[in-house]
Image: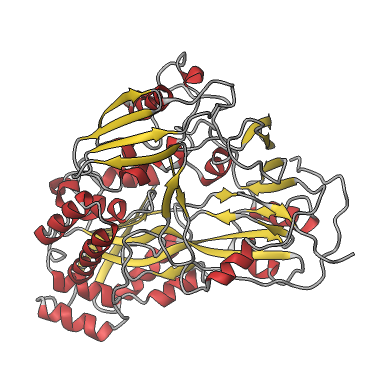
């Protein structure tokens, strides 16, 4: 496997910079130090950034890109109407203009008007206008396209061009967070001249977007090289080339970093991270994602239809022990939303108290416990089988006899998408990614009764009229402060009703050369280079 080689020899970096960055409970200054939003100027002549990713992108067509490896590349080629700008550690992101310079909605957030930037051109030289935006959104919502972000547009009724650079979007129901949907990389805008001749479902080979980079070369099976887009509307990047090298084995990514063949290694395993932290010239960055791992409970099946039983199961789980299994690459979750999601509200988590669990089971009429079945994936999440087995042991300690059934991920999705009367499980282990970084996505789809299967993600068939009303109000509320208050109420209701056993927020680890500044890690797992640059280490 070829790895990008440096022309100039590297200098040895003296000293050791050991840094761990988590989104929760970490000072903003530490986050700044990790990837460097600081003042040092770029070193002249050092303008090629080599990045090792785990997998070759399945496609560079934004509508088909779904893995973090693919999106890490696509993010530099295309832009969306709206940009989600990450906040400081532990805070929600903010929405800022992308290809839309501004937008507004009617009072009930069912009609949205987006004003498109003028003077922007695609990589192929064609101009960006309202019709280009319309064509892209129509392609993304066409079921034949098989777009990764199609669900983000499921409420879209029509897209109307009302001026050369203005589009009006009508939704089937209120959706105050709709601009956050449009910020997802899968809805990046590309030149319509590229896909107008494609058959439905056919992918673009090299997208002509409006981003700061273009594809210079794609050596299949080895690497993708990006070069600066001379037509880019914004400040030109300080890095002239980005080289993404495909190294499936973590050991290969680590070796390439240690040898100086690459500058950034993504998806580092925990054990290797500890070793890298002992090396001079390398910074290890640990960060929580917005993926929450949980056990959903089938609230239509007895005895899980009783809140006391569900609360008992929550008290039976030793979450710190689960974190030990994951070697610390996660943080305990106190609720269904990660702190980086808009609408997150802290709530008292269930403490590990097996005595309390037994008392609640006895009060509910099950002093001897009961039998239940847990469906879980194998290899979908870090150590998912070990986590399921640990939960099995913990529940047995309070008298609940848990039978584990392991299923391939596609099969697990199918089995948990059946109507309640066909569901064969009492519980399921799964993770949810809040891909919009907005609480509506992580709450409405999971806990509103109308979202129960078939057709929805409320796989535990949870139904609570209070929660339904709050979630519907949250969708329509345009005042961000009022929406936060609504979601805080929802989270408290869910905590008390306990339809989930919330386990942890999944982490991610990257490693970079310490002389690099200006990188950022998106909570969804992909890399943004922004104004990345090399700084002078001060070592001769």
**Observer able to see residue 505:** yes
Quarter occupied by the C terminus:
bottom right
In the picture as drawn, the residue positioned furthest to the bottom comes out as: 355
Say whether residue 286 is left or right of residue 444. right
Q: Residue 101's image quarter?
A: top left
Could you tell whether 28 is left or right of 154 in the image? right
What residue appears at the point 19 percent right and 58 percent down from the top-left corner? 298
Give residue 463's quadrant in the image.
bottom left
Nearer to me, 458 or 188: 188
The residue lying at 59 percent from left, 43 percent from top is: 55
At horizontal 42% and vertical 57% (from top left) the residue drawn is 93
What residue is at 68 percent from the left and 37 percent from the top? 223
Q: Position of residue 465 (x, y in %)?
A: 9, 58
Above or below, 27 relative to 2: below
Q: How is the image coloured?
A: secondary structure
| Percent x, y of residue 312 | 21, 76
Q: In the drawing, does residue 473 fall left or right of residue 323?
A: left
**Residue 231: image location, x then y, percent:** 63, 30
């Amino acid at each position: 496997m070829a790895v990008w080689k440096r022309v100039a020899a590297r200098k040895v970096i003296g000293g050791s910079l050991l840094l761990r960055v988590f989104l929760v409970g970490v000072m903003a200054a530490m986050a700044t130090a990790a990837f460097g939003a600081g003042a040092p100027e770029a070193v002249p002549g050092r303008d090629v950034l080599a990045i090792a990713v785990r997998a070759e992108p399945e496609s560079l067509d934004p509508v088909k890109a779904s893995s973090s490896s693919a999106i890490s590349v696509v993010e530099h080629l295309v832009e969306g109407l709206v940009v989600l700008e990450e906040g400081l550690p532990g805070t929600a992101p903010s929405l800022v203009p992308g290809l839309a310079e501004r937008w507004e909605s009617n009072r009930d957030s069912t009609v949205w008007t987006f004003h498109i930037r003028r003077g922007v051109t695609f990589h192929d030289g064609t101009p960006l206008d309202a019709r280009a935006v319309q064509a892209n959104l129509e392609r993304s919502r066409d079921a034949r396209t098989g777009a990764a972000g199609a669900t983000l547009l499921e409420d879209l009724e029509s897209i109307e061009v009302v001026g050369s650079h203005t589009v009006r979007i009508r939704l089937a129901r209120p959706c105050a967070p709709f601009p956050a949907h449009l910020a997802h990389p899968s809805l990046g805008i590309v030149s319509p001249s590229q896909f107008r001749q494609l058959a439905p479902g056919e992918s673009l080979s090299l997208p002509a977007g409006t981003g700061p980079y273009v594809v210079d070369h794609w050596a299949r099976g080895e690497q993708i090289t990006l070069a600066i887009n001379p037509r880019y509307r914004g400040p030109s990047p300080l890095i002239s080339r980005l080289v993404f090298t495909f190294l499936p084995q973590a050991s290969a990514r680590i070796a390439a970093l240690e040898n100086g063949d690459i500058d950034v290694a993504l998806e580092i395993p925990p054990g290797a991270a500890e070793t890298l932290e002992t090396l001079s010239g390398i910074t290890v960055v640990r960060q929580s994602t917005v993926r929450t791992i949980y056990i959903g409970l089938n609230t239509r099946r007895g005895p899980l239809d009783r809140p006391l039983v569900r609360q008992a199961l929550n008290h039976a789980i030793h979450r710190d022990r689960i974190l030990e299994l994951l070697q610390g690459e996660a943080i305990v979750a106190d609720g269904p939303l990660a702190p980086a999601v808009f609408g997150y509200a802290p709530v008292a988590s269930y403490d590990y108290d097996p005595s309390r669990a037994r008392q609640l089971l006895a009060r509910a009429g099950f002093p001897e416990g009961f039998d239940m079945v847990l469906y879980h994936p194998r290899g979908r999440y870090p150590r998912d089988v070990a986590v399921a087995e640990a939960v099995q042991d913990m529940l047995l300690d309070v008298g609940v006899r848990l039978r584990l059934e392991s299923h391939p991920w596609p099969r697990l999705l199918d089995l948990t998408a059946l109507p309640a009367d066909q569901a064969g499980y009492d519980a399921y282990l799964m993770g949810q990614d809040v891909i919009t970084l907005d609480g509506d996505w992580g709450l409405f789809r999971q806990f509103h009764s109308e979202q129960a299967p078939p057709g929805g993600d409320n796989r535990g068939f949870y139904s609570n009229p209070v929660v339904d009303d709050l979630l519907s109000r949250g969708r329509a509320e345009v005042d961000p402060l009022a929406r936060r208050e609504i979601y805080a109420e929802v989270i408290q209701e869910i905590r008390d009703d306990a339809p989930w056993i919330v386990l942890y927020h999944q982490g991610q680890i990257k490693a970079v050369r310490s002389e690099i500044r200006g990188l950022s890690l998106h909570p969804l797992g992909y890399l943004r280079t922004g104004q990345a640059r090399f700084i002078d280490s001060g070592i001769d």
